[in-house]
Structures are given as C-alpha cells and as structure tokens.
Amino acid sequence: MKITTLVENNIYCRQEERCKDLKSQHGLSLYIETADKKILFDTGQDDLFYRNAEILGVDISGVDYLVLSHAHYDHVGGLAKFLEINKTAKIIIRGGDKADVYSKRLGFYKYIGIKNELLEENTDRFFMIDEEFKLDENINFMINTHHEGEPLRGNSHLYKKKEDGYILDDFSHELIMVVEEKKGELVVFTGCSHGGILNMVKSVEDRYPNMEIKSLVGGFHLQSNITKKLAEPKERVINIGKKLIGIPHIYTGHCTGKEGFAVLKEVLGGQIEEFNTGKVFEI
C-alpha cells in the first residue's frame, strides 16, 4: 500500500525540487493506492489537494473512491473540486443523522460542514453508511463503538444543530477505514479521531479479535486549533502513547500537532512518524 500526503498542516520536503511549489494548510488529504483501488481519504479545506496532486503526479480523475472521514471543513472543503474533476468515484460518508456541524467562537456559531447543495445535487455519487460497511474482502468501514474516558478538550467548541438549539457534537458523522491487504494484518485510517484514538482502536480490536493492527494512520486531535499548542494534559498524551505501543507502525499529523507528536515520540520512538504534505510512504 502506497500513501501520498496531498494536504497536511506542514511541508515534508521543502528542499526537494518536486516539492518547491507545494503548499500546506490546516487540513488532511491522503491518496491511498491499495493492490486494486485508488482511494482519496479526505480533501482538505479547498482545492489545494488537487493542486498538490498535480505537482506530485497524482491523477484525481482516476480515483475510485473518495472517503470523507467526518464532516468538518478541513476534511471536506475540497469536495466541490473533487466533483468537478472526478465524474465517477463513489463518495463514502457516514449517513444517518444529518451532520449539521458548527464551531462556537466568542459566543457565535459558524457552520463548518459539507455544503448542502453538493449533497443535494450529487445524491447518486454518495454512499452513506450507518453501521459497518464492507466495500470488498479487504476494505471495511466502521463506526466508533467505544466512548470511554473524558472527551478531548479540543472538542469543547464543536457543536451540532438540532431543532431546539445546539448540542455538543457527538461525532456520529465520524468513520474508521480498515484495510487488510496482508492476511491478518490491519491498517487503520482515522481523520481526526474526535471520539478518541484509543476508543477507535478498541472498536477495531473488538471487531477483529484475531488480527493485528499493523499500522495506524491519522490525526489524533491533541492540538488546540486556536493556540496551536497541546490541548490535553501531557500525562494523558503519555498514557495514549503507552497504550499504542502494541501497534508497530504509527503515522500521524494534522490535528495531533507538533507538541502532541513530540510527546508521543518520547514514548513510541521509531514506531511513530509524521506525515506532512508531500510525504510518500509505503505500508
């Protein structure tokens, strides 16, 4: 499996000729090549994923599936551009309760979800899942079934709109992608892990009790979007790292943040790496 980082908060390879024109942004977009499928995992905030893809030699028109890990702007903002460029790929997203999601700042609520007109005008392109959905014998989409521990502090400003007002986001619009290319070995993808990375890992372990999570790829939402500093107590991040020690290869970035990564690196050492814009790696 080959993964190309199209969008992430930082640039990986500023000194390389192929990377000189790459741009970064607060967001996530990964191009994943499995044995027989080409998957785009999130689209960042806007059309940057496409501009970077052209520089990196990635053909967005040839993507088989677009997976939207959850409904926040920094993961779905490039959807309009994707629909413009790619006319055939199915788009996999959590269904069920409408993801009417907002961020609350200074007492005001700002909509940060998918543009409704894109959903309404392209209903034939979307495949909305409510529970587990097995795409084929190797790729499965799951929901988080564990909700243990205190909510992440970085979630405190995130809300959903209901008929009678706003409630804290329960992240029922978040999904997990699990890929098994090598028998008995799983690669787990998350977007921001708003439900808690340990909860999401536990959900996968419960579903696959006789298999090993070989690699974990995604953001862990440990950074404050306002201060860009570590949002969680350091002790909690250390504990997260200790509980992830059993996973041999961990690739993280975006909402994990630089400070969060540094703390995890202290615990996990060579088991954990950053994926920044332009980084290509194989699992």
Image (cartoon, rainbow, N blue to C red):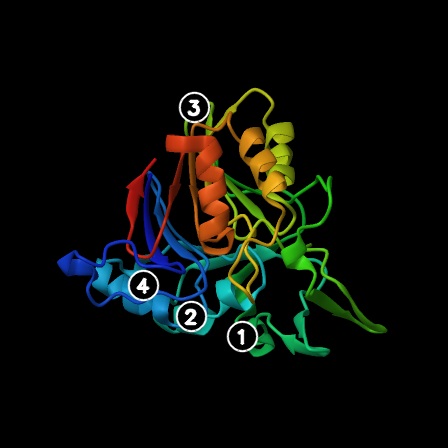
Q: Residue at x 39, y 67 (%)?
A: 87
Along the line of sight, the residue nearer the viewer: 213 or 268 = 268
Query: Which secondary structure lies at badge 3?
Result: loop
Q: Gap between marks 4 and 3, in whole Å? A: 30 Å
Residue type, label 1: Leu
Q: Earlier in the sequence, mark 4 or mark 3?
A: 4
Along the line of sight, the residue nearer the viewer: 92 or 149 = 149
Give the total number of marks visible in the rendering: 4
The answer to whether residue 156 is above or below residue 280 is below
Q: Is residue 189 left or right of residue 148?
A: left
Mark 1 Cα shell of 10 Å, populated few (<14), some (14-19), many (≥20):
few
Residue type, label 2: Leu
Q: Position of residue 159 (x, y in %)?
A: 71, 66
Residue type, label 4: Ser
Q: Earlier in the sequence, mark 3 or mark 2?
A: 2
Mark 2 Cα shell of 10 Å, populated few (<14), some (14-19), many (≥20):
some
Give residue 118's mark: 1
Q: Gap between marks 3 and 1, in whole Å? A: 38 Å
Q: Position of residue 280 (x, y in %)?
A: 28, 47
Q: Gap between marks 2 and 4, in whole Å? A: 9 Å
Q: Which residue is mark 3?
A: 183
Q: Position of residue 136 (x, y in %)?
A: 48, 39
Which quadrant of the rendered structure holds the N terminus?
Answer: top left
Q: Earlier in the sequence, mark 2 or mark 4?
A: 4
Q: Earlier in the sequence, mark 3 or mark 1?
A: 1
Q: Which residue is mark 4?
A: 61
Q: Gap between marks 2 and 1, in whole Å? A: 9 Å
Q: Which residue is mark 2?
A: 83
Query: Which secondary structure lies at badge 4?
Result: helix
Q: Gap between marks 4 and 1, in whole Å? A: 18 Å
Residue 215 seen from this side: no
